[in-house]
Image: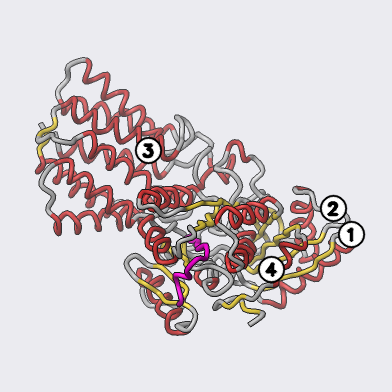
């Protein structure tokens, strides 16, 4: 089960993961975008940490909402609205829940992805964060249906996200700034898919 | 990286500080969220016109805040879209009761952040209409991309919409003018060198001493093709041909023409481009009735230029000629 403290531990871990991968994500973004994804994610999650420390939200849903608002306010670019919407929808999915069981965790990621798809209108294979998140969600739903425990569900999700992330390498971007490269976007891993993979991997590591 | 900065993370805030110090008679700068607002905002009964985008394109947009142009600008981090709280604050600061027009350049991040801001403002009862500019003909395959980028026409749209709002046209009318300007405007740019985002610390792309990028975006995004460096006349022909054939601009058309520097190209070179552009237009019977030559929508220190043409008529030209008083554009006052 994931309670409020476990959730906060995940957010804390995310802030560390994005700080550690600031240069890496920015490098991926400079290959096919505008060289700021790592910088923006790091800035966003530092603000998240500061806001959480300041407001100390009482429950899971309000923690997620605080994360959303901080990201929307500080990340900018496309990632700000997209990850902001992810956490906003996740917050809604967790209203009145004090603990998240396996089905609740999968529901959190499902609601988040739905928000991202609505905001960004990307489909699978457009070379975006959806390419990591959608296969991950499908793998997690299958693992949940097979009555696996949370750890196994998340591990299967991470494996699918990693595969999806790597699958973006041969794709030609159809959404976002990378789409302007046309065929020249082929051969590069998508930075958004990478930050999405890192997000899920941090959850699997922390909630193991 | 060699830049006239203090710390990369302070670039935007310290530059805004300079704008406030230099142009306090025209604009005020508010922080957290960062916005540049016309000094006398809100103007009662006038449609508010705001825009915004990543920093690094100066003077766009903050340099265009003032009488006859923008009521407010939302500067994001360098090359990063501003955030919805900025647009929300700007919209509220300029709302004089007649609604607010958002002029949004077509980039995925800008469009999404402005959308979220418009939702927030509308929830509070402020009427907002957004018009997205997308004039960059370098993007050919709009179906399979995020669509044409918004570039040079944004400068012309901000001037013309600002004038329309000063004339007390209503929100729908100002938005219609904006759409008309966008529909009749086309641009394309090129780069000789890359730019360096301060926080990234190294050039966004590698380009050889004898190479150029045709169709470059204003963030250093690649364009149509990388090719061997050509003369100014040949480059101007390539850009002009792509633009003129796209709308197309025809014999007998009147246009407002902008030759814009990307930030690192001196005026002496921009005038060489304008000279050739003028010859090309004359040969095709296209009359340049107004022009702008200079750095208006830049890409940090990138060397290169862009050309924008706007097919104009009496209404648009009169709005273009209307008085404007901003840090970067001033006439008629």
Spatial distance from mark 1 to mark 3, Cα to Cα? Answer: 49 Å
Question: In x, y percent, where is residue B27?
Answer: 46, 77
Q: Residue at x 59, y 51 (%)?
A: B149
Is B40 part of what is drawn in magenta?
yes
Residue on which disc 2 sits? B250
Residue on which disc 3 sits? A116
Res. B192 in view: no
Both labels 2 and 1 in a single chain: yes
Q: Residues within 10 Å of mark 1 (few under 14, many from 20)?
A: some
Name the image quarter holding the C terminus of chain A. Answer: top left
Question: In x, y percent, where is residue B245?
Answer: 79, 49
Q: Chain of mark 2?
A: B
Q: Which label's residue is closer to the chain start, 4 or 2?
A: 2
Q: Chain of mark 4?
A: B
Image marks 1 and 3: residues in contact by CB distance under 8 Å: no
Q: Is residue A131 above or below residue B120?
A: above
Q: Which label's residue is closer to the chain start, 4 or 1?
A: 1
Both labels 4 and 1 in a single chain: yes
Local secondary structure at mark 3? helix
Res. B145 in view: yes
């Amino acid at each position: 089960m994931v309670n409020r403290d476990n959730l906060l531990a995940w957010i804390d871990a995310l802030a560390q993961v994005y700080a550690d991968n600031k240069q890496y994500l920015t490098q991926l973004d400079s290959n096919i975008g505008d060289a700021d994804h790592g910088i923006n994610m790091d800035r966003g999650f530092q603000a998240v940490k500061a806001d959480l420390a300041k407001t100390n939200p009482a429950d899971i849903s309000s923690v997620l909402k605080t994360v959303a608002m901080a990201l929307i306010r500080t990340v900018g670019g496309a990632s700000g609205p997209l990850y902001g919407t992810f956490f906003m929808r996740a917050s809604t999915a967790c209203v009145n829940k004090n603990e998240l069981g396996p089905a609740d965790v999968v529901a959190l990621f499902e609601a988040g992805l739905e928000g991202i798809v609505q905001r960004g209108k990307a489909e699978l294979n457009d070379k975006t964060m959806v390419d990591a998140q959608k296969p991950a969600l499908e793998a997690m739903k299958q693992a949940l249906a097979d009555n696996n425990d949370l750890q196994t569900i998340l591990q299967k999700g991470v494996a699918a996200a990693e595969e999806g992330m790597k699958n973006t390498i041969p794709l030609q971007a159809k959404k976002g700034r990378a789409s302007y490269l046309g065929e020249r976007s082929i051969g590069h891993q998508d930075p958004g898919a990478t930050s999405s993979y890192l997000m899920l991997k941090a959850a699997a590591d922390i909630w193991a | 990286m060699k830049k006239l900065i203090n710390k990369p993370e302070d670039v935007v805030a310290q530059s805004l500080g300079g704008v406030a110090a230099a142009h306090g008679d025209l604009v005020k700068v508010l922080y957290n969220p960062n916005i540049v607002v016309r000094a006398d905002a809100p103007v009662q009964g006038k449609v508010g016109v705001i825009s915004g985008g990543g920093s690094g394109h100066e003077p766009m947009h903050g340099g265009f805040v003032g009488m006859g142009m923008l009521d407010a600008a939302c500067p994001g981090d360098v090359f990063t879209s501003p955030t919805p709280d900025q647009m929300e604050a700007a919209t509220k600061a300029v709302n004089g009761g007649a609604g607010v027009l958002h002029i949004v350049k077509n980039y995925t991040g800008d469009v999404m952040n402005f959308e979220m801001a418009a939702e927030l403002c509308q929830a509070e009862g402020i009427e907002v209409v957004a018009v997205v500019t997308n004039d960059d003909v370098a993007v050919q395959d709009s179906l399979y991309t995020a669509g044409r980028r918004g570039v040079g026409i944004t400068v012309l749209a901000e001037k013309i919409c600002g004038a329309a709002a000063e004339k007390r046209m209503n929100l729908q009318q100002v938005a219609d003018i904006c759409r008309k300007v966008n529909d009749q405007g086309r641009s394309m740019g090129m780069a000789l060198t890359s730019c360096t985002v301060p926080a990234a610390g190294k050039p966004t792309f590698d380009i050889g001493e004898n190479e150029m990028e045709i169709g470059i975006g204003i963030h250093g995004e690649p364009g149509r093709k990388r090719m061997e460096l050509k003369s100014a006349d040949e480059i101007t022909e390539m850009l002009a041909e792509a633009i003129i054939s796209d709308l197309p601009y025809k014999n007998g058309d009147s246009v407002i023409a902008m030759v814009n520097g990307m930030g690192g190209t001196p005026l002496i070179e921009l005038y060489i481009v304008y000279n050739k552009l003028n010859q090309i237009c004359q040969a095709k019977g296209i009359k340049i009735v107004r022009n702008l030559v200079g750095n208006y929508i830049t890409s940090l220190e990138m060397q290169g230029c862009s050309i924008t043409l706007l097919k104009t008529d009496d209404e648009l030209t009169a709005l273009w000629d209307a008085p404007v008083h901003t840090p970067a554009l001033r006439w008629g006052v």
